Image (cartoon, grey):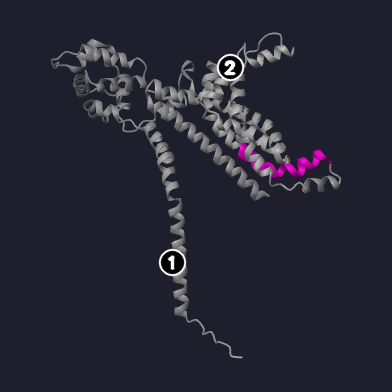
């Protein structure tokens, strides 16, 4: 029998084969990148860019310098321990005259008022009372309108507003402010708001997450254990909240939980209560509505993991002498921990950003940080403060996620 002789590969042939393999691999990589490029572009445009713009807006402080460039240049390098420069007072008068009757005056007044309450009225009244003639002594002309112009604090506020960057909004989001000496100190107790709001937001989110876990775990287990039409009907019941608008669901809870609503009527009819309970416009209503909205996000991750667990492992543990409770806790539950962690993370992260549900169902003391972000952006037009609150919430959330990821990785290493 004739056998073909396969010639041995030379070093040049091997080099050519390696080059072709590398070229083929690069083509596959570029093809894979081309397939996911539209998704990456969508994420960058709709997720990354808005976040960057929000964080930039919270520290950007160039509007004042554009509206009052003269005083900004005159106060550059000024030390508050030295007398107020006459050139700064003269430049300030010129800037106010130029801004009078234009939107620039509102920008100047609003920015200084954000630094110190009451400075808006000071700026507006000064702009109205300034004469058309250039005074010989600019500082004397200003102090004749208000004694505050002869004191360093107002000029320090102008200096702090000169930009281009500022920490004022981020500090305010943490109930802090800069002192006249340049240090950082807490705001007075009657002005401290946001630390309490953040604590309330995270407290509500933790309670809602625990409630969803307690209610969702048995439902997920029941779903994973059911078969046929029963499982389909139960899954449909879990998915129904996804198909209902958030505003409709929230409004429905207002109707159900009010003093003359269906829930109080049923409780009185069953004889469980004598008088209607306050279930809406308080923390109780907020918990109920948030749990209803977020419960599917707890059930589905746990169910998807439970559906793949082999039931014979629990039966084997029981056959070896373990009690059903021990078999569940030592064998079944550890296999569901990744699903529980995913569900808790989803519910918690979504809960801290809720706005509509607490705003409609909660009381004045139940509003979460989303309410204040929306207030600053849509009502008071203080976009920088809203951006600072949103940026701080994002930073805290990222820290929580990184800490959880680090803990999970450390547990794997220890195991």
Point out which mark residue 102 bears. none
In the image, residue 332 lies in the stretch drawn in magenta: yes
In the rendered image, which residue does mark 2 sit on? 255
- Find residue 242 and report its horizontal and vertical position in percent: 57, 33
Question: Cβ–Cβ below 8 Å for labels 2 and 1?
Answer: no
Give the class, few, some or many, for how many residues have Cα within 10 Å of label 1's Cα (few <14, many ≥20): few
* Residue at 40% over, 23% down: 378
Please name whichever residue, 251 or 63, is drawn nearer the observer in this view of the structure.
251
In the rendered image, which residue does mark 1 sit on? 23
Tell me if I can see residue 178 in this picture.
no
Q: Which residues are magenta?
A: 323-343
Vertical comparison of 308 with 76: above or below: below
Asked where in the image residue 167 lies, by quadrant, the reply is top left
In the picture, measured across the screen, residue 30 lies left or right of residue 162, that is: right
Q: What's the distance in space between the residues labelled 2 and 1, CA to CA?
A: 65 Å
Please name whichever residue, 104 or 82, is drawn nearer the observer in this view of the structure.
104
- Find residue 258 and report its horizontal and vertical position in percent: 60, 14
In the picture, measured across the screen, residue 203 lies left or right of residue 21, that is: right
Vertical comparison of 162 with 255: above or below: below
**Which of the two marks, 2 or 1, is nearer to us in this view?**
2
Q: Secondary structure at mark 1?
A: helix
Give the class, few, some or many, for how many residues have Cα within 10 Å of label 2's Cα (few <14, many ≥20): some
Please name whichever residue, 91 or 3, is drawn nearer the observer in this view of the structure.
3
* Residue at 41% over, 35% down: 55
């Amino acid at each position: 029998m004739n056998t073909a002789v396969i010639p041995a590969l030379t070093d040049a042939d091997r080099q050519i084969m390696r080059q072709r393999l590398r070229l083929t691999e690069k083509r596959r990589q570029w093809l894979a990148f081309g397939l996911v490029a539209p998704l990456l572009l969508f994420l960058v445009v709709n997720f990354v860019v808005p976040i960057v713009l929000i964080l930039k807006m919270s520290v950007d402080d160039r509007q004042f310098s554009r509206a009052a460039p003269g005083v900004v240049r005159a106060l550059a390098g000024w030390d508050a321990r030295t007398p107020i420069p006459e050139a700064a007072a003269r430049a300030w008068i010129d800037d106010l005259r130029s801004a009078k009757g234009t939107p620039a005056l509102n920008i100047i007044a609003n920015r200084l008022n954000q630094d110190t309450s009451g400075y808006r009225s000071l700026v507006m009244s000064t702009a109205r009372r300034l004469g058309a003639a250039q005074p010989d002594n600019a500082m004397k002309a200003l102090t004749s309108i208000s004694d505050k112009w002869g004191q360093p604090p107002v000029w320090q506020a102008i200096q702090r507003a000169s930009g281009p960057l500022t920490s004022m909004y981020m500090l305010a989001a943490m109930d802090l402010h800069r002192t006249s000496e340049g240090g950082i100190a807490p705001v007075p107790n009657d002005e401290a708001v946001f630390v309490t709001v953040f604590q309330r937001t995270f407290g509500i989110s933790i309670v809602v997450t625990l409630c969803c876990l307690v209610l969702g775990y048995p439902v997920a287990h029941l779903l994973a254990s059911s078969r046929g039409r029963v499982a389909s009907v139960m899954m449909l019941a879990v998915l129904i909240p996804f198909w209902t608008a958030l505003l409709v669901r929230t409004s429905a809870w207002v109707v159900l939980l009010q003093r003359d609503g269906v829930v109080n009527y049923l409780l009185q009819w069953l004889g469980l209560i004598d008088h209607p309970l306050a279930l809406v416009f308080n923390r109780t209503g907020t918990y109920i509505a948030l749990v209803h909205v977020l419960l599917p996000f707890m059930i589905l991750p746990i169910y998807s993991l439970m559906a793949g667990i082999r039931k014979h492992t629990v039966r084997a543990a029981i056959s070896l002498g373990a009690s059903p409770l021990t078999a569940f806790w030592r064998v079944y539950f550890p296999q569901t921990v990744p699903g529980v962690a995913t569900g808790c993370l989803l519910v918690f992260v979504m809960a801290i950003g809720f706005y509509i549900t607490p705003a409609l169902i909660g009381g004045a003391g139940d509003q979460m940080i989303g309410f204040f972000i929306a207030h600053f952006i849509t009502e008071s037009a203080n976009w920088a403060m809203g951006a600072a609150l949103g940026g701080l919430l994002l930073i805290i959330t990222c820290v929580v996620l990184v800490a959880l990821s680090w803990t999970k990785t450390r547990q794997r290493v220890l195991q």
